[in-house]
Image (cartoon, rainbow, N blue to C red):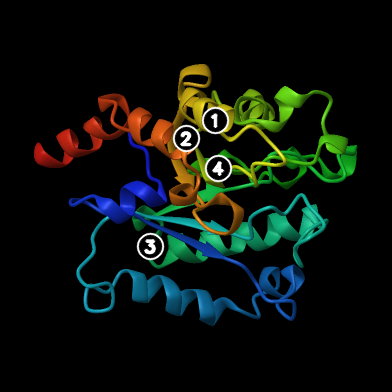
């Protein structure tokens, strides 16, 4: 199993993997992307990412995560399922037409739960189709208690349940970004423990990225940090990555 997280990326020697998130500014509406107004932008990006001179000869696949958390109201591109589908498919088709699709892992990444959680805003309304998605990811953070049915739903096992039930038998999965909250709002030790239990509960989770800033800085967390350092040493988390690389 490959686990990619900020702590591992910062402290380890060895192979590196790139995850690029693309967040359109407010002026770049989904309808404009779908209509082709930004084709040249994407053509330039994909060509650059295939040019060894511009990527320091990096040949590793790139996880591309466009327009994540689309099933929420805090992003400028949210609440538009039809326009999102059209924009995503156009971006993918551009990558395919110029030969960049094989070099990019298209990572479709909803928020762990739709806000609001109503029929027209369900995450599946935004799913472009299996042929346009390589991996499924999600953002995994602890929501406020008012938005969940139980305390357990605030932690990683609960946060990953819905997306896994819907897509776990179809695509490789990852937590594309996630982490705990401040200690006065949650049990950080429990969060770290469940973080490492996610692939045991949901076996098709193949990678985890910890967003290590703000209230989620592991180095400032004392006991949770010590637990994290202990659990991440397991060969099932970091061993297979280096075995695979060494065998090439």
Tell me the residue that label 3 is attached to. Answer: 100
Q: Of the residues tagged 4 and 3, which is closer to the observer?
A: 4
Residue at the (40%, 35%) spot, across then down:
226
Q: Which residue lies furthest to the top in this view?
A: 201
Q: How crowded is mark 2: few (under 14 residues within 10 Å), some or many (20 or more)?
A: few
Per the model, the C-alpha gap separating discs 1 and 4 is 23 Å
Residue at the (57%, 32%) spot, across then down:
191
Per the model, the C-alpha gap separating discs 2 and 1 is 7 Å
Give whichever of discs 2 and 1 has the lower sequence position: 1
Mark 2 residue element: helix
Residue 15 vs 26, above or below: the answer is above
Q: Residues within 10 Å of mark 4 (few under 14, many from 20)?
A: many
Taking depth in this image into account, of 161 and 134 the one nearest to the observer is 161
Q: Residues within 10 Å of mark 1 (few under 14, many from 20)?
A: some
Residue 141 vs 43, above or below: the answer is above
Per the model, the C-alpha gap separating discs 4 and 2 is 28 Å
Q: Position of residue 196 (x, y in %)?
A: 46, 28
Q: In which quarter of the image is the C terminus?
A: top left
Per the model, the C-alpha gap separating discs 3 and 1 is 41 Å
Give whichever of discs 1 and 4 has the lower sequence position: 4
Cβ–Cβ below 8 Å for labels 2 and 1? yes
Left/right of residue 159 with respect to residue 6 in the rendered view: right
Residue at the (66%, 80%) spot, across then down:
37
Q: How crowded is mark 3: few (under 14 residues within 10 Å), some or many (20 or more)?
A: many
Mark number, residue 223:
2
Q: Of the residues tagged 3 and 1, which is closer to the observer?
A: 1
Give whichever of discs 3 and 1 has the lower sequence position: 3
Residue 226 vs 115, above or below: the answer is above
Tell me the residue that label 1 is attached to. Answer: 189
Tell me the residue that label 4 is attached to. Answer: 137
């Amino acid at each position: 199993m490959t686990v990619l997280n900020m702590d591992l990326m910062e402290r380890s020697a060895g192979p590196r993997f790139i995850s690029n998130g693309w967040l359109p500014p407010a002026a770049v509406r989904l309808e404009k992307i779908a209509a082709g107004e930004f084709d040249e932008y994407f053509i330039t990006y994909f060509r650059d990412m295939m040019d060894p001179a511009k990527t320091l000869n990096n040949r590793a696949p790139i996880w591309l995560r466009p327009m994540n958390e689309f099933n929420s109201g805090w992003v400028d591109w949210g609440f538009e399922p039809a326009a999102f589908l059209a924009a995503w498919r156009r971006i993918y088709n551009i990558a395919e037409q110029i030969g960049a699709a094989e070099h990019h892992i298209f990572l479709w990444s909803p928020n762990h739960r739709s806000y609001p959680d109503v029929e027209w805003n369900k995450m599946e309304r935004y799913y472009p189709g299996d042929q346009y998605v390589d991996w499924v990811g999600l953002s995994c953070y602890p929501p406020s208690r008012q938005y969940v049915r139980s305390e357990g739903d605030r932690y990683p096992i609960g946060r990953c349940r819905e997306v896994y039930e819907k897509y776990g038998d179809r695509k490789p999965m990852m937590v594309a970004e996630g982490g705990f909250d401040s200690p006065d709002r949650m049990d950080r030790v429990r969060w770290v423990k469940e973080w490492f239990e996610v692939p045991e509960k949901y076996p098709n989770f193949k990678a985890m990225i910890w967003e290590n800033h703000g209230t989620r800085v592991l180095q400032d967390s004392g006991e949770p940090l010590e637990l994290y350092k202990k659990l991440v040493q397991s060969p099932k988390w970091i061993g297979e990555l280096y075995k695979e690389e060494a065998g090439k």
